[in-house]
Amino acid sequence: MKKILLALLLVSGTAGGQDVPMVRELVREGVALYDAGHYDQAVTKYQQALAALPGYATAQAELAMAYAAQGRHAEAIALCQQLLQAHPADADPLVYITYGNSLDASQQPAEALAVYRQGLRRYPDSYLLYFNQGVTLAGQEQEAEAVASFQHAIGLNPAHASSHMVLGGVQLGAGTRIPAILALARFLVLEPGSGRSAQRQALLDQAMLQGVSQADAHNVTVNINLPESSRKKGKGKKAGPDDFGPEELLLSMAGALALGEKNQSKTKIEKFIDQFGTLCQALGERGKVAGGGFARTYYVPYFVELEKKGYVPAFAYLAHSAQPNAPDVQQWLAAHPTEVQVFQEWSKNYDWPKVPF
């Protein structure tokens, strides 16, 4: 994610007005160096700016971020504390994020969470604050709270790929298979070809075939272990808000069918297309569920419409485009650029629902 230059804050110091353009240029140069990963040189630029104009809050905030990138978290923490004390009404959300991240990296997660909460009271619409709060919560194995924080971030910014990615990983670890699949799939739509995409694509493939094993072409075993949210917990008690039990069962059966003898001639990606299309159809056939949770109300309509419009092949090949040693994927993408473009345009313009929190 490209770092955004912080907004100009109130400044203090004795430098004359003629020095301000030069100081701003030093900060701009520092930002460019930071974005290129040259953190040492960026630090030098910010320090030069502060030598010319002490107390320049923008340079201080950028310097704190550069310190954090270098692993100099104690110095980043000190700068953020100074900024929040000097400019309590003007501190940018990124100051709270840098402060919280450095506290978390310094093995102070409780203090980091307090900083994120402080920032969110001032900036309740900051998706990055929610995202970073979620990362810290996940690190403390507070899965439910982490999931809620990532969902807030996604509700505020549907195009924030990292929130979908980490949400999918946390949910997969917690055993909520269908929501994890939908979150990972959405991440791969947004970021199909990056360095981290191949790993998440592998996680998605594993989740799709979870519980399905194959001894040979004639012997496929399905082991279904429904999540707690799909089970009745006693007479008169209903399942949880995101009950995907029926879809989970159908997905496992579709996985067994994909590995069966009749589909041995199909490629791995063709089997994925069949199975993912079956999942989307099942989600659509069940329709709305009373009291449905985030995955049901947010992700499901998107993927149901995706399947109805015939975009599953374009999605599948695009989602697997970072897969190494898969010439059939690259060949399909090269032969169907229009289909991919139409799908991406539809996805870009999709009207995501407002999520009440």
Image (cartoon, grey):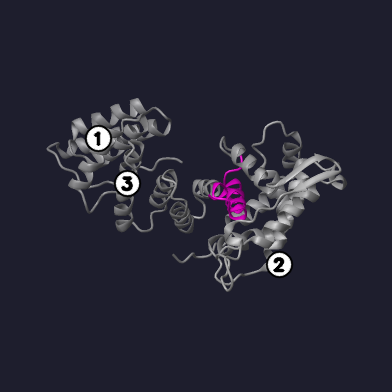
Give the distance between the C-alpha atoms of the residues marked 2 and 1, in whole angstroms.
61 Å
- Please, what is the three-letter code of the amino acid marked with disc 1? Val
Give the distance between the C-alpha atoms of the residues marked 3 and 1, in whole angstroms.
36 Å
- Please, what is the three-letter code of the amino acid marked with disc 2? Glu
Determine whether, in the image, residue 18 is placed left or right of residue 110: left
Disc 1: CA contacts within 10 A as few (<14), some (14-19) or many (>=20): many
Would residue 180 be counted in the magenta stretch?
Answer: yes
SS label for mark 3? helix
Q: Can residue 347 be spotted in the picture? A: yes
Q: Can residue 259 be spotted in the picture? A: no
Identify the residue at horizontal 49%, vertical 55% (top origin).
Answer: 154
Determine whether, in the image, residue 110 is placed left or right of residue 297: left
Judging depth in this view, the residue of 50 and 282 nearest the camera is 282
Rendered view: 183 above or below 58: below
Residue 339 at x, y = what percent?
72, 50
Q: Residue furthest front?
A: 234
* Residue labelled with disc 2: 285
* Residue labelled with disc 1: 23
